[in-house]
Image (spheres, grey):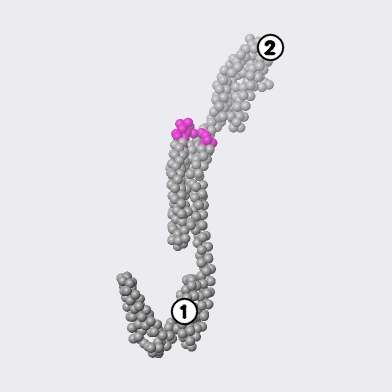
Amino acid sequence: MSDWTAFGRVDADGTVYVKTAEGERVVGSWQAGAPEEGLAHFARRFADLVTEVELTEARLNSGAADANHSLSTIRRLRTSLAEAHVVGDIDGLATRLDRLAGLAEEKAGEARAARDAARTEALARKTVLVEEAEKLAAESTGWKTAGDRLKEILGEWKTIRGVDRKTDGELWKRFAAARDGFTRRRGAHFASLDAQRKQAQSVKEELVVEAEKLKDSTEWANTASQLKELMNQWRAAPRASKEAEQRLWERFRAAQDAFFTRRSEVFSARDNEQRANLERKQALLAEAEALDIDGDPKGAQARLRGIQAQWHEAGRVPREAAGGLERRLRAVDDKVREVMDSAWRRTSPQDNPLLAQMRAQVAEAEERLARAKAAGDARRVRDAEQALSSKRQFLNLAEQSN
């Protein structure tokens, strides 16, 4: 640039020329001073062009500028050189601009490829999201999880750029339709669930009422069976709303607890009573088994009758002990009978006290029949005749066996 005459000259009339490989070209006129000043003026204009080219090149190499925009600038500068009013190495600058144009075209191609790849990737990502949304809308029954995922898909959707407007609009319509379809299906599900819960609440309210009717019952076995069946029905019924389910369950459980608590108290008292009865009967049994049946059969028989009377008054004992106690007492009774029968068979009919007692009963029955006939009471006569016949039959059998 210090040797301006290498790229231009000023002729005698002040016309300024620039030198190029194609020859000289007029770039202006200088009348204001020395020719050297004129060349310097037009050289500064050239330097401005060079600065613009260098700035464009630097931005292009750094990636700060859009390659297409840089290419447009380079082409503008390259075209302007043919008529630029400057003095300088126009051919060298043209070569530099041509090289930069090639670089800009290459970078623009890379940018287009990157944009195409990004567009393809963005399209693929949005397509995957749409298909996932459509699958959730059609199949999912995990309502909260699916709803949360649809929100996440929407958030991710908004971050994806680069899909052309038409395609993006079509994909958005599919996504919106899927989301709306899911919302409708979820709404229908919960509406149905609400209806089921209301029905379940009605069913369980009836079960509670039935349980509360039974809580004061004293029919222990039957009521326990009924409450068990009510529990089975409760478990088989759908769940009501959380609040109603809890409230009804507390009432249902309270009714059951009231019945079973009372039953437990009654059974506990009964068990205590039966254990006391068991101790009493064990004492009576020990007394019966200690009787001197062979030495004093009549005394043993009399005492055994007293023991048997107390035995029946003692009441029930635990079931597992009752059979054994009864068998042991019957064994004592059988032994007493056997000894007494043996003694009775050895006694003459006239001296047998049992026969005397039976004859007295027959005589008393005959007197009762006579009084009934005298009173003319047909019913009394009929009853007296039946009683007399029965007593005579037993007396005959006793006399025959003796």
Q: Which residues are magenta?
A: 157-175
As measured in the structure, the alpha-carbon distance from the residue carrying label 2 to the one carrying label 1 is: 167 Å
| Residue at (31% x, 74% y) in the render | 373
Q: Which mark is residue 305?
A: 1
Closer to the observer: label 2 or label 1?
1
* In the rendered image, the vertical position of residue 194 relative to residue 266, given as above or below: above
Asked whether residue 230 appears in the rendered view, the answer is: yes
Mark 2 surroundings within 10 Å by alpha-carbon count, few (fewer than 14), some (14 through 19), many (20 or more): few
Quadrant in the rendering for residue 376: bottom left
| Residue at (51% x, 77% y) in the render | 284
* In the rendered image, the vertical position of residue 277 relative to residue 158, given as above or below: below
Which of 396/268 is in front? 396
Q: Position of residue 271 (x, y in %)?
A: 52, 68
Amino acid at dot 1: Arg
Asked whether residue 11 appears in the rendered view, the answer is: no
Q: Position of residue 40 (x, y in %)?
A: 67, 17
Q: Is residue 167 magenta?
A: yes
Mark 1 surroundings within 10 Å by alpha-carbon count, few (fewer than 14), some (14 through 19), many (20 or more): some
Q: Position of residue 168 (x, y in %)?
A: 47, 33
- Residue 97 located left or right of residue 367: right
Q: Which mark is residue 33?
A: 2
Amino acid at dot 2: Gly
- Pointer 2 and pointer 1: residues touching (CB < 8 Å)? no
